Image (tube, rainbow, N blue to C red):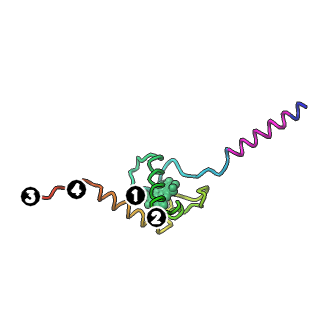
Amino acid sequence: MAHRILLSFALSLAALHLAAQQPAPNIPDKFTNLQVLPPNITKPQLVGLMKQMAITMKVRCNFCHAVTDDLSSGDFSSDEKPTKLEARKLLRLIQQTAAPIQPPHE
Ligand code: HEC
């Protein structure tokens, strides 16, 4: 009897463990290939921006990133996809445009 209880306890622990190991999106905590965004950007800021881009363009992360559809594997820092390079140009353009506009010389 005690064995059974122990066994079912062990099984439920195992199930919990499995649940915790569901393929979690592998969005890294440290970014290694930022060329436009500031190096000190936080993860929530970066992910917020990425989600906004994805929603605006009606695409998923792997439109630009060499990652699987469920984000469980791949590499966000890779520049393999031309769409990412195009999007980087767009970010650069936005950054330049957002810079303070100089008043015209008189
Ligand atoms: C329209 C293209 C596009 C989409 C869609 C997109 N990203 Fe990005 N992502 C970029 C670009 C461009 C960069 C590089 C920015 C730079 O160089 O400063 C980047 C950088 C990143 C990085 C930093 C990688 C590193 O180590 O340098 C992560 C993490 C990331 N994106 C996650 C996501 C996630 C998660 C999604 C989906 C919610 C997503 N991205 C959707 C274009 C995109």
Q: Is mark 1 within 8 Å of ligand 1?
A: yes
Mark 3: amino acid: Glu
Check if mark 1's residue and mark 3's residue have beta carbons within 8 Å: no
- For label 2, the residue is 84
- For label 1, the residue is 35
Q: Which residues are magenta?
A: 5-19
Q: Is mark 2 within 8 Å of ligand 1?
A: yes
Q: Residue at x 47, y 69 (%)?
A: 82
Of all residues, the one furthest to the top in this rendering is 2
Check if mark 4's residue and mark 2's residue have beta carbons within 8 Å: no
Check if mark 1's residue and mark 4's residue have beta carbons within 8 Å: no
Quadrant where the image shows the N terminus? top right
SS for callout 4: loop
Mark pair 3, 2: CA separation = 41 Å
Mark 1: amino acid: Gln
Mark 4: amino acid: Ile
